[in-house]
Image (cartoon, grey):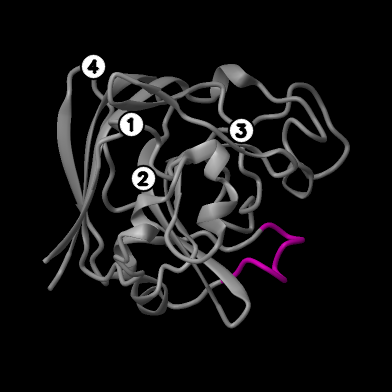
Amino acid sequence: MATYTETFGKDAGGWFGWISNSQGPKPLEIRGGCAISRSPWWIDYNHAPPGAGYMHLLYMLFTAGAAGEHHREVAGANRYIAGGLGTDFTDARITLRLKGELVSRGSQLHLLCQGVHDGICTGWLLTGQAFEVTSDWSEQTVHCVLDEQQWTCLGSRHDRADFYGRTPLATVLADVNTDILFVLHPLDVAPMGPIADDPHTLRPERDYPVWRSRLPEGYVMLDEVRIEFPG
């Protein structure tokens, strides 16, 4: 069994946060061997209805290709890609050691796996299993089972179907060639005041203000990420 372990002892090891579509990645706060992500978080609107909805992107890691080097200044050297661990996440077990203070407001912390196949980027969110953020350290594991009932395909907002879409879970898990993320989903995105158009055709906090009081708040401290791949 091959195993990847990141303890954030020196730097982020390739992990990063996200500012916005226009501004791109942001560095995680690394303190005492922990990678810390704090609110307010950007609202990812790429999968607004008719997609699976809005998300906060707390932690991201490229799993293949030169993209892992593009953000070296932000995230440090990508130790996952350097370790040659591959992109087959079928039946992989992902364990986090984490704690924090989170006002979740109905959201949960989930694993997201993304891959590009035949020109379409597909994201599968492991909504059947979640990580719980508690005030004390805990170690929790999710299992990348090949069962679409435990996953939610993100799909696409109305105007991004040329890039985002749906590829079978088996195809994506066998080749997660883009990235893995830990995200908060779902989000209660509500316009602050009336707007003339369908809000899902617009971009929250870019085209209209939102009630931040309805979104998750807090911080998450990630002490270790461990991924165990079947032999």
Magenta span of residues: 157-165
Q: Is residue 106 left or right of residue 85?
A: right
How many labels, in total? 4
> Residue type at mark 4?
Ser
Q: Residue at x 82, y 35 (%)?
A: 207
Q: Residue at x 39, y 74 (%)?
A: 175
> Residue type at mark 3?
Trp
Q: Quadrant of residue 198?
A: top right
- Rate crowding at label 1 as few (under 14), some (14 to 19) or many (20 or more) other CA atoms within 10 Å: few
Cα–Cα span, label 4 and label 3: 23 Å
Q: Nearer the viewer, mark 4 or mark 1?
A: 1
- Rate crowding at label 4 as few (under 14), some (14 to 19) or many (20 or more) other CA atoms within 10 Å: few
Cα–Cα span, label 4 and label 2: 18 Å
What quarter of the picture does the C terminus occupy? bottom left
Instruction: From the image, tell me which residue sits under label 4.
Output: 135
Instruction: From the image, tell me which residue sits under label 1.
Output: 10
Residue 164 forms part of the magenta stretch: yes
Whether residue 120 is visible here, answered yes or no, is: yes
Q: Residues at badges 1 and 2 in contact (C-beta under 8 Å)? A: no
Q: Residue at x 36, y 45 (%)?
A: 110
- The residue tagged with tag 1: helix, strand or loop? loop
Cα–Cα span, label 2 and label 3: 16 Å
Q: Residues at badges 2 and 3 in contact (C-beta under 8 Å)? A: no
Mark closest to the chain's N terminus, 4 or 1: 1
Disc sitting over residue 197 in the figure: none
Instruction: From the image, tell me which residue sits under label 2.
Output: 110
Q: Residue at x 48, y 24 (%)?
A: 216
Instruction: From the image, tell me which residue sits under label 3.
Output: 42
Which residue is at the front of the view, 45 or 86? 86
Residue 64 point in image, percent of width and height: 45, 65
> Residue type at mark 2?
His
